[in-house]
Image (cartoon, grey):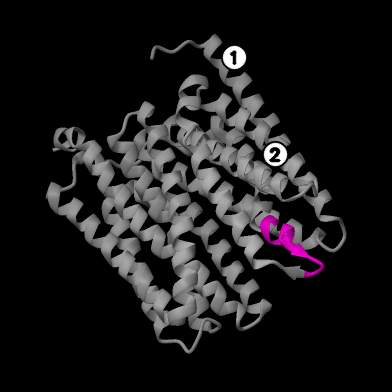
């Protein structure tokens, strides 16, 4: 049965990509729709919404993602989609976005979010060679950027025309369609290949060589996370937000970052995983330093778009290195740890901006973010040097 799966791995990957694309469009539409609903209830409601979105992701990536290594990843993805459907149906029964049940449902959706990606990566890792994983994770990253643009636009339109219930219906439809696609994969193979049922091997000590990469991912996102507020702040003049300018910055960022991320595979194949991680971190730090300058719209768009492009290269290379470093049956745990480092860094960036926003000029805050990214570059460089020293001392047949 594994031979059948391996032979049809390419077509299987395409179907899983389709499921990911469908569910991500619905997810992004829901995020912007629920945020609009919360903003109508006040800034405190929106702030609480952001909190219940980030914190559960960290918990899910740490404690739930490793569970996908113990079962068929496709079944895990289907279970996550079923949980999502139940959570969204619960919001249908509320009077509005700002209610206890809405917040609880949002927390559940965030809790299972990293589990879905970990199960997806675990599945891909078990049917894909080490060399092929960079293409897989590059494709996932590009799908995320594309669906961000499509989903945000769809969510804003539906929220304006049909309000929150219209956005919920759209997301429910997307999740149900994704579930049907995944069910088709299950029915196609009839039974789970033995390799997908293999229990995780190894111990937590096996993760020690990856500690520098974990730290680099956290530090880089601690700096790069400022992008979540950067467009809005740069689009504000005299305390008034220019929505047209904000949309221009965000959409251009997304399109150019998508194009830039297409370069990750040839760079990865040319340099290798860790040198790509280190190089992308250095260039990202430079982009953040330029972003700290209030030098006009062209510089704002060019530097922030380049920063996002280098961020995609960094993320794809680091994620690939992590999930390929150990046996395929550890991929779910490693993907969860990657997501935990990523989102904890982004959350830390948000906290830092909140604490320093009234005390320091925004340009200075962005410059501090550049410093954090530069430290990530230093840590990644240390990992490169240590890796080469280890390979020189203990050559391994490939």
Let me know if residue 217 appears in the view.
yes
Horizontal side of 219 relative to 202 (left or right) equals right
Q: Is residue 232 magenta?
A: yes
Q: CA distance from mark 2 to mark 1?
A: 30 Å
Quadrant position of residue 392:
top right
Q: Which residue ends up furthest to the bottom in the rendered image?
A: 95
Q: Nearer the viewer, residue 216 or 71?
A: 216
| Extent of the magenta region | 230-239
Which image quadrant: the N terminus? top left
Q: Is disc 1 placed on a helix, strand or loop?
A: helix
Let me know if residue 164 appears in the view.
no
Q: Earlier in the sequence, mark 2 or mark 1?
A: 2
Q: Nearer the viewer, residue 137 or 337?
A: 137
Where's residue 217, x and y in %? 60, 41
Horizontal side of 294 relative to 252 (left or right) equals right
Disc 1 target residue: 389
Counting the numbered discs, the total is 2
Disc 2 target residue: 287
With respect to residue 395, does 358 lie above or below?
Answer: below
Disc on res. 342: none
The residue located at (52%, 81%) in the rendering is 97
Q: Nearer the viewer, residue 250 or 130?
A: 250
Answer few, some or many: residues within 10 Å of disc 2's Cα (few below 14, many 20 plus, some between 14 and 19): many
Where's residue 109, x and y in %? 44, 67
Where's residue 144, x and y in %? 45, 51
Which image quadrant: the C terminus? top left
Q: Is residue 339 magenta?
A: no
Answer few, some or many: residues within 10 Å of disc 1's Cα (few below 14, many 20 plus, some between 14 and 19): few
């Amino acid at each position: 049965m594994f031979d059948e799966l391996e032979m049809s791995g390419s077509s299987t990957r395409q179907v899983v990509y389709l499921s990911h694309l469908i569910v991500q469009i619905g997810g992004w539409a829901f995020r912007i729709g629920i945020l609009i609903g919360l903003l109508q209830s006040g800034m405190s409601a929106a702030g609480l919404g952001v909190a219940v979105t980030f914190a559960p992701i960290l918990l899910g990536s740490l404690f739930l993602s490793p569970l996908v290594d113990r079962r068929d990843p496709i079944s895990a993805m289907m279970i996550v989609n079923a949980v999502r459907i139940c959570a969204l149906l619960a919001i249908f029964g509320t009077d509005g976005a700002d209610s206890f049940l809405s917040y609880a449902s949002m927390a559940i959706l965030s809790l299972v979010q990293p589990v879905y990606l970990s199960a997806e990566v675990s599945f891909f890792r078990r049917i894909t060679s080490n060399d092929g994983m960079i293409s897989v994770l590059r494709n996932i990253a590009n799908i995320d950027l594309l669906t961000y643009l499509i989903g945000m636009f769809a969510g804003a339109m539906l929220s304006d025309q049909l309000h929150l219930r219209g956005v919920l219906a759209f997301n429910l439809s997307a999740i149900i369609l994704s579930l049907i696609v995944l069910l088709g994969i299950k029915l196609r193979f009839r039974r789970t290949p033995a390799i997908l049922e293999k229990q995780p091997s190894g111990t937590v000590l096996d993760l020690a060589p990856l500690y520098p990469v974990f730290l680099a991912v956290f530090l880089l996102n601690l700096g790069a996370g400022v992008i979540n507020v950067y467009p809005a702040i740069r689009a504000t003049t005299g305390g008034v937000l220019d929505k047209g300018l904000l949309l221009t910055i965000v959409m251009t960022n997304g399109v150019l970052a998508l194009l830039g991320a297409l370069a990750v595979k040839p760079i990865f194949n040319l340099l290798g995983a860790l040198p790509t991680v280190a190089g992308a971190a250095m260039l990202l730090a430079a982009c953040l330093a330029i972003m700290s300058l209030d030098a006009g719209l062209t510089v704002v768009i060019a530097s922030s778009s380049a920063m996002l492009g280098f961020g995609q290269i960094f993320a794809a290379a680091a994620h690939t290195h992590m999930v390929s470093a150990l046996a395929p049956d550890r991929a779910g745990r490693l993907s969860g740890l990657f997501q935990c480092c990523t989102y904890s860094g982004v959350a830390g960036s948000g906290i830092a901006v909140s604490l320093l926003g009234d005390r320091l000029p925004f340009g200075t805050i962005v410059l501090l973010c550049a410093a954090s990214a530069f430290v990530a570059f230093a840590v990644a460089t240390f990992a490169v040097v240590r890796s080469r020293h280890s390979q020189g001392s203990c050559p391994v047949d490939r």
